Amino acid sequence: MNWKKTGLLSISIALGSVTGLSTLGIEPVLAATATETVKVYNQFQQYVQKPTFLANARNYLINHIDEVDKWTATQMTLQLENTQKAHLSVYSEKVFPEKVQKEINNAFSKGKNLTYTSLLNTIKDSNVRNVLIEGRDKGYKLETSEGMYYPVMHYEGFKTFKPYVTKDIAAYIDIMATESNQPSVSDAAIVIPWAELTNRALAIEDFVTKYPASNRSTALQKELLIATSRLLYGSSNTPAYDYDEQVIKPEVKKAYEDALKDRKVDTRILSILEKLLQLLNSTNNKFTPVIEKFLVETVNS
């Protein structure tokens, strides 16, 4: 029995529609496995549906995901992500008070490290420690920007679930973890090499092309629009074209050229870059009305 069939069986059991396992020709061991899947799934629901039990839900999934089939493991992983994202703004309010910010800043100034281990080794205030421990246990991590400290999703932590989920969600976790581990933009400036920025956009494009029916395809389609626009225009503090000369920056053009050299298949982004480079070669690399028209039509298409 493949994982899809096992997953459907699990749901049927949960809904009470399977009453005679023996009549279906299911071996006792497999029936017991399916029953265990439902037991684990139902217990997880008791935690994940209540934000106050988010830490319990995460810990339970870490310790029991290997006891369920692939379909159920995937659903549970996505449910955990949904709950973490929904609860993020609530938890953020606990990090924003001045006292918490000051304690984190003092600790960060000493160790230049925002890991919970480093911060908790320095911070002694019990209330602030409890806030940090809560964030750690709920699966968030801390980032800093413009002098503020704030929690974000910690997708690297989701990699522990990769062996148990479907291929598309494993790929999704990798994409999100790459951005979570090293954000593309900070303080409105691109803080990764343009080659890496290009590769990330191509990775997202590959996902939405390869897994159009994935549960996370719509989310990454939105990310693809952002990534494509950023790749072509840059950001507020790191534009792709020099402000004064209106010429494309050498490192940006090189990233485009290298992406085309390395291409193994034709994609929409690579086709855009190829056409853009042709136009730039005809304008001596200057941002002209022709280039602007092409980019506007491309981003909005």
Image (cartoon, helix red, strand yellow):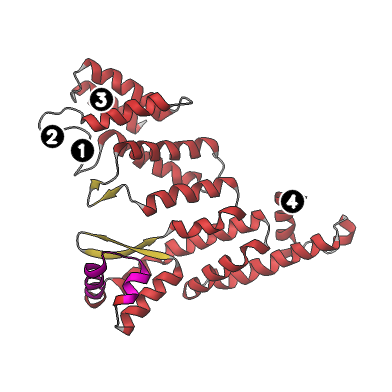
If you read the primary sequence from the N terminus, does the residue marked by circle 3 or circle 4 appear first?
Answer: 4
Query: Could you give the CA–CA distance between mark 2 and mark 1, rounded to whole angstroms?
Result: 8 Å
Image coordinates of residue 218 in percent, x first then y, are 48, 45
Tell me the magenta residue range.
Answer: 101-121
* Mark 3 surroundings: few (<14), some (14-19) or many (≥20) residues within 10 A: few
Residues at badges 2 and 1 in contact (C-beta under 8 Å)?
A: yes
Left or right of residue 288, residue 8 in this image: right
Q: Is residue 104 magenta?
A: yes
Which residue is disc 1 drawn over?
239
Residues at badges 3 and 4 in contact (C-beta under 8 Å)?
A: no
Left or right of residue 232, residue 81 in this image: right
Q: Nearer the viewer, mark 1 or mark 3?
A: 1
Residue 273 vs 70, above or below: the answer is: above
Q: What residue lies at 56% left-to-right and 66% top-to-bottom?
A: 62
- Report if residue 215 is visible in the image: no
Q: In which quarter of the image is residue 131?
A: bottom left
Q: Helix, strand, or loop for circle 2? A: loop
If you read the primary sequence from the N terminus, does the residue marked by circle 2 or circle 3 appear first?
Answer: 2
Given the image, on which type of amino acid does mark 4 rest? Lys
Residues at badges 4 and 2 in contact (C-beta under 8 Å)?
A: no
Image coordinates of residue 109 in percent, x first then y, are 21, 68
Which residue is disc 2 drawn over?
243
* Mark 1 surroundings: few (<14), some (14-19) or many (≥20) residues within 10 A: some
Q: Which of marks 4 and 1 is in front?
A: 1
Which residue is disc 4 drawn over?
5
In the image, 210 versus 23, the foreground residue is 210
Q: Helix, strand, or loop for circle 3? A: helix
- Quadrant that contains the C terminus: top left
